Amino acid sequence: MSSHAPSEHGFTLLEVLVAITITSIIGIALWQTLHSTLNTRDHVDRVSKEFLQLQRTMTVMERDFLQIVHRPTRDRYGELTPALTGEHPSFDILLTRQGWRNPLGSRRSNLQRVGWALVGSQLTRTDWVTLDQGQEDNAVEVIQLDNVHSLQVDWLVDEQWQNQWPQHKSQQGTENLQHHYGALPRAVRIVIEHERFGKIDRIFAMPDTLPIQAFKNASLPDDRKGMAEKAQTGS
């Protein structure tokens, strides 16, 4: 009886190469899937953060307008500054508001001077501890919204949206400077052009104006009305 040694059989070079190739393809596919998932999650996180930032900005701005008061201030030279103005050289909106909480019981007013400005691509909010003083004293600036391309402000006066506030005294028909500088429009329209969310258009009624009354039958300023009509007709 003859005995035969058991034959040894291993993988050929071709089989090894095929196995390595298949493993590599599976690994690359898994990595691409994981990478895509992580990128999607990062994108969703970024969009969520920007949206929350936008929501907070609109909430803070709405609170400022809802608590606005007819209280002009004085600058470092003692000159009156309107309670609400869009004509300040450093701020797109400058206003006086109430409701400034004082949990520590500090010796200060519950009124606060607030300024909104577009600085580069950032919408900022600045406030001051005291009302009647130089605007750069004790100023606290906070970035509210990033990636802003433009900021447009309109003021509702006598059912017309105006580009300017306050109105000139000759337009308003009053010689009482204190009354003139304490006057308020019926509403303020804010249009923000955002990099991600596009055009954000909000109307804020003044505290003593019902929202439905604020913009009912209101028309745009002449220059912007023409632009709107052009856009509608497609010409």
Image: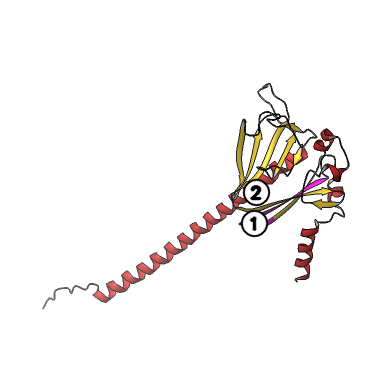
Which disc, if any, is residue 54?
Answer: 2
Mark 1: few, some, or many residues within 10 Å (few <14, many ≥20)?
some
Magenta highlight range: 185-199
- Residue type at mark 1? Phe
Marks 2 and 1: CB-CB under 8 Å? yes
- Residue to which mark 1 is pinned: 197
Image quarter in which the N terminus is found: bottom left
- Residue type at mark 2? Leu
Image quarter in which the C terminus is found: bottom right
Whether residue 72 is situated above or below residue 18 in the rendered picture: above
Which of the 4 image quarters holds residue 84? Answer: top right
Report if residue 159 lies within the magenta region: no
Report if residue 193 lies within the magenta region: yes
Label 1 element class: loop
Task: Looking at this view, name the residue that lies furthest to the bottom.
Answer: 1
Is residue 118 visible to the viewer in this orientation of the structure? yes
In the displayed structure, does residue 228 sit left or right of residue 217?
A: left
Comes first in the chain, label 2 or label 1: 2
In the rendering, at what x and y percent does residue 115 appear? 68, 39
Q: CA distance from mark 2 to mark 1?
A: 9 Å
Label 2 element class: helix
In the rendering, at what x and y percent does residue 27 appear? 38, 64
Magenta part, dominant SS: strand
In the rendering, at what x and y percent does residue 135 appear? 65, 34
The residue depicted at 31 percent of the width and 74 percent of the height is: 18
Mark 2: few, some, or many residues within 10 Å (few <14, many ≥20)?
some
In the rendering, at what x and y percent does residue 48 appear? 60, 51
Whether residue 235 is situated above or below residue 99 in the rendered picture: below
Question: Of residues 83 and 33, which is closer to you in this image?
Answer: 83
Question: Of residues 128 and 44, which is closer to you in this image?
Answer: 128
